[in-house]
Amino acid sequence: MSNAGNTRGERSTWSWWYLLFLIQFVAVLWPPFYNKAEPALLGMPFFYWYQLACVVVAAVMTASIYVITEK
Amino acid sequence: MQNVNWVALSVFVLLFGFITWLGFAAAHWRKGDLGQLHEWGLAGRRFGTLITWFLVGGDLYTAYTFIAVPALAFGAGAVAFFAVPYTIVVYPLLFLVFPRLWHVCHKHGYITAGDFVRGRYGNRWLALAITVTGIVATMPYIALQLVGLQVVIGGLGISGTGWVADLPLIVAFLILAAFTYSSGLRAPASIAIVKDILIYITAFAAVIVIPIQLGGFGKIFAAVPHEKLLLAVPGSNTTGAYGAYATLALGSALALLLYPHSLTAIFSASSGRAIRRNAALLPGYSFMLGLLALVGFFALGAGVAKLPEFAAGFKQFGNNFAVPALFLHSFPDWFVGVAFAAIGIGALVPAAIMSIAAANLYTRNIHCEFINRSPTPGEEAQLAKWASLVVKAGALVFIVFVPLKFAIYLQLLGGIWIIQTLPAVVIGAYTRWLNDWALLVGWAVGTYAGTAMAISQDLKPGYPLKLGDWTLPGYTAFYTLILNLAIAVVLTLVLNALSARRPAADATVAADYHA
């Protein structure tokens, strides 16, 4: 079969660092974590500012994974 | 409807004129032979990290998104914020899967998902299923972009009766059709830069200026009815709103990148590395989308729905008029022009990419596969240019003659349909293990079940799945994807057991999938 075997020493396509992506999934796909109004930030309920903060954290995590695995 | 807002209209027309010029001038940008399909339809795969950022951002975060997400917040409250987790979880997928697809497509000259599936599985009928799904899911999406355009044109105070009412829309679409025909993907890529800058300016102005006018976030959120502020806590024996919210976010994320226009924008990147970098940079748009969702609450806080000057707009466009009304209410006229131009141009960029993507699919996977098997490169590119015109004309006819709600229903069904291509495309990027006929049956059952479930729920996105004593409300696309996958796996096992193992057809090798 033509797609067998990947033993010619190419850069591996898997890195254990990718498991960090799971944190992003759990953090935003489990609403019981964040479906509440308090603590509010500048008058914005927790539900909203938590998810917006997750965008920033996810972007920084993805950038870190990129830098680490691109070596 | 209110009187024509001349200042706003002038700014709007000026910016529209500029992007029209830009769209035609783009033909000379990073010059290539536009008589070749990969040059017209993928801009020669030469876009680096930054242009890809503008292009994919301009493509995925559409005008309809900027109107509909705040409108959902305005009407339904917290559930609209699913757009934020949705656009968070989509990027790990972009990071992991799509560089692999980019590499194999670059290596073999594939420009569509249909090309990839044809090469990977050697099955033209499976490729046809992927192709038809892509085209059918894209058409109503193009039509919905016109809704964004229609709402801002209405907001500028332009109205009329009969065909005159649709004239501005038709003019905008003729412009779009002309520059797409002449410049291909280079046109939306260059216009996306202008559009995205305008959208960022608008979003940040809205989130800073309007809360100050309204007396701060505390006051705005205090005006939101309690039941809309948070998700309803589920009762016993159900996952309630929590399950619906999470599956809607995850299912939408899994579907998004499978749309032909997403793949077209991703494949036009110059390297797998540019795609991975964008997985870290594109959340910039997600953040902005989250801010814009809040604008729906601002509209509640400002009470625009009760102001007499907006009554006609709400009557015509429903909650989709919330954002334009708020902008008219809060911004000086010249800035209303900027904001509306941002949304209007924001409609043209994805509409152009969608029509190019659908044209690429028709040309490569229907015409060249079933009608004329050996066109010259020039004939192939010319055919795609004509196909892009047909696709856009179809969308225009749809929006002018068919009630708006059908476009929305079809776009919703489109999400359920396009996700059924995931097993062949995404799993195919990793392994050839799944049998191609098993994939085809999984696709057919998933598509049929998803359509039937959506119709049984009056074309709402959620389905209350019963499991023993439990009710699990969730996104239909997500449930039917699981069904599709299960069928593909079981049938593959059965077919492998029944037939003598012959080597599966596969034009690709493992080394094609990475640098």
Image (cartoon, rainbow, N blue to C red):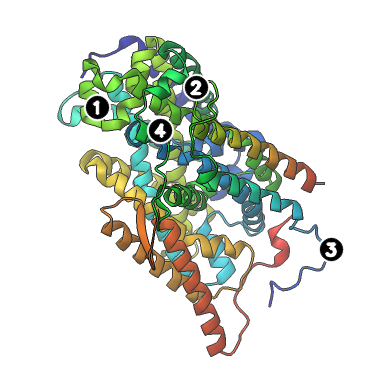
CA separation in Å, label 3 and label 2: 55 Å
Q: Amino acid at mark 1?
A: Phe
Residue A9, disc:
3
Q: Which residue is mark 2?
A: A43
Q: Amino acid at mark 3?
A: Gly
Residue at x-position 39% and y-position 16%: B337
Q: Toward the viewer: A71 or B235?
A: B235
Q: Mark 1 or 2, which is nearer the eye?
A: 2
- Res B32 visible: yes
User: Secondary structure beneath disc 3?
Assistant: loop
- Count residues near mark 1 (Cα–Cα under 10 Å), then give few for <14, some for 14-19, many for 20+: some
Q: Are marks 1 and 3 in contact (CB under 8 Å)?
A: no
User: Secondary structure beneath disc 1?
Assistant: helix
Q: Point out residue B441 in the picture as x, y percentages from the top left corner.
A: 43, 73
Looking at the picture, does residue B62 appear above or below residue B122?
A: above
CA separation in Å, label 1 and label 3: 62 Å
CA separation in Å, label 1 and label 2: 29 Å
Same chain, labels 1 and 2: no
Residue B47, disc:
none
Residue at x-position 80% and y-position 57%: A11
Residue at x-position 63% and y-position 60%: B108
User: Secondary structure beneath disc 2?
Assistant: loop
Q: Which residue is mark 4?
A: B229
Q: Toward the viewer: B143 or B302?
A: B302
